[in-house]
Every structure is written in C-alpha cells, then in structure tokens.
Amino acid sequence: MQPVIPSRRHRRQRRECDKQLYRLRHLVENAFLHLKRWRGIATRYAKNTASFLAAVHIRCIAIWASIS
C-alpha cells in the first residue's frame, strides 16, 4: 500500500504522492458522499440485494445526469 493523501505543509519529512491518483480517490469519495445523502441508500430500506443495487444504480444515474 502507498499513501495517497499528501503530507501536511509543516511536516519535516514530506511524503511523495501521486496527484493523479489523489484526484481519482477524491472523485470516488465524493461519489460515495452523494450516494449516502440519499436516505434510501444510507439507511438501506431495500429488503433484498437486487432492489438495493437497483436503488444505487438509479441514484448514480441521477447524479450523472445532475438531477438531485
């Protein structure tokens, strides 16, 4: 494993990090944040896996289409 988060500015020994990988990590974290903002997914009201996955797909399409 490699650290992806850049080190703080006041740290004496700085870690190197891949900025492109950090951007991708940030996008993934934001996607999960948007998914969790939808109550049906955050509390998982779906009774089975198929309906839960369908709800996740619907929410991802809504996020992609910018319909919130």
Image: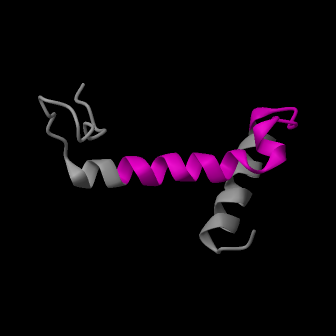
Name the image quarter holding the C terminus: bottom right
Camera-nearest residue between 33 and 62:
33
Residue 3, image quadrant: top left
Q: Magenta residues?
A: 24-49
Give the x, y percent position of residue 32.
59, 46
Residue 5, image quadrant: top left
32 inside magenta stretch: yes
| Rendering colour mode | one colour
Residue 57 drawn above or below residue 2: below
- The prevailing secondary structure element of the residues shown in magenta is helix
Residue 36, image quadrant: top right
State the residue at coordinates (56%, 52%): 31
What count of labels does the image hold?
A: 0
Residue 63 drawn above or below residue 28: below
Q: Is residue 34 left or right of residue 27?
A: right
State the residue at coordinates (39%, 46%): 25
Q: Is residue 62 left or right of residue 43?
A: left
Residue 27 drawn above or below residue 9: below
Give the x, y percent position of residue 22.
31, 48
Give the x, y percent position of residue 55.
77, 50
14 inside magenta stretch: no
Q: Is residue 65 left or right of residue 13?
A: right
Name the image quarter holding the N terminus: top left
Q: Residue furthest front?
A: 10
Q: Is residue 41 left or right of residue 63?
A: right
